Amino acid sequence: MTKVAIFASGSGSNFENIVRHVQQGHIEDIEITALYTDHHDAYCIKRAEQLGVSVHINEPKRFESKSHYEQHLLSLLSAEGVQWIVLAGYMRLIGEDILKAYPHKILNIHPSLLPKFKGIDAIGQAFRSGDSITGSTVHYVDNGMDTGEIIEQRQCDIRTDDTIETLEERVKQLEYELYPSVIAKIIR
Ligand code: GRF
C-alpha cells in the first residue's frame, strides 16, 4: 500500500471524490492516511468526518514561520509514513522544506489548461478570456505557482451561454475523472 496524504483548504469535493474512488476500489493499493488542512472551518473537514478519514488541522498563523509550519507537517507526514502528497484545492505554495522531503512526489490539480491561467480564479480568467476551450491540468508541484511539470490535461468547451457557475461545474466534472485516473497511474 502506498500511503498518500491529501492537502485541501476549502470545499474538498476533489478530496471526497478521490477518497470515494479509493474506498470503492477504483484506485487500488493506495491508502489515504489523512486530510491535512490549513483552515479550522474548511468544509473539507466535514467531508473527511463523513468519510471516516482522519484530519490534521494546522493553521500557519499559529507557527513562528513557514518553515516551522512545514516542519510540523513533515513530522506528522513522517509519523504516518506518507510517501506521496496530493494537493486538492490547497491554497498555499508548498515551501522548500516539504519540496525537499518529497521530490517529484507531490501532485496538484489546477482548473485550466496550464500554462494558461495560473494562480487564483483560473476559471474566471478563462471565462473572461474569450477562449472557446479550457480544462484542467494535473502536474507535479515545484516552487512556483502552478509551474511544475504537466502530467495530464483534459479539455472542455466554454460555451457562449455559460456563466462562471456552469463553466465551473463542467471543469469540476472533468477533474473528478482526471485526478483519480492520474493518481491511479502515477502513484501506483
Ligand atoms: C479545484 O478546482 C482544483 O482544480 C483547484 O481547487 C479546486 C478545489 O475544489 N486547485 P474542491 O475544494 O475540490 O471542490
Image: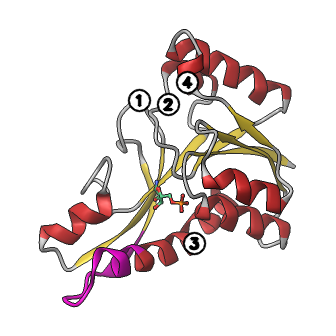
In the image, is the residue at mark 3 within 8 Å of ligand 1 by its beta carbon?
Answer: no
Badge nearest the viewer, 3 or 1: 3
Q: Work out whether residue 145 or residue 168 is closer to the camera in this orientation and state it.
A: 168
**11 relative to 80, above or below:** below
In this figure, which residue is indicated by the disc labeled 4? 60
Spatial CA span between label 1 and label 2: 7 Å
Marked residue nearer the N-terminal end (1 or 2): 2
The kind of residue on which mark 1 rests is Asn
Spatial CA span between label 2 and label 4: 12 Å
Spatial CA span between label 1 and label 4: 18 Å
In this figure, which residue is indicated by the disc labeled 3? 176
**138 relative to 97, above or below:** below
Marked residue nearer the N-terminal end (1 or 4): 4
Spatial CA span between label 3 and label 1: 25 Å
Q: Residue at x 22, y 90 (%)?
A: 161
Q: Is there a contact, CB below 8 Å, between mark 1 and mark 2?
A: yes
The kind of residue on which mark 4 rests is Pro
Q: Does the stretch in magenta take in 172?
A: no
Q: Work out whether residue 12 or residue 112 is closer to the camera in this orientation and state it.
A: 12
Which colour style is shown? Answer: secondary structure
In this figure, which residue is indicated by the disc labeled 1? 143
Residues in magenta?
Answer: 154-168
In this figure, which residue is indicated by the disc labeled 2? 94
In the image: residue 130, left or right of residue 17? left
Mark 3: secondary structure? helix
* Figure quadrant of residue 37: top right
In the image: residue 63, left or right of residue 174? right
Mark 2: secondary structure? loop
Residue 105, percent from left and from top: 61, 39
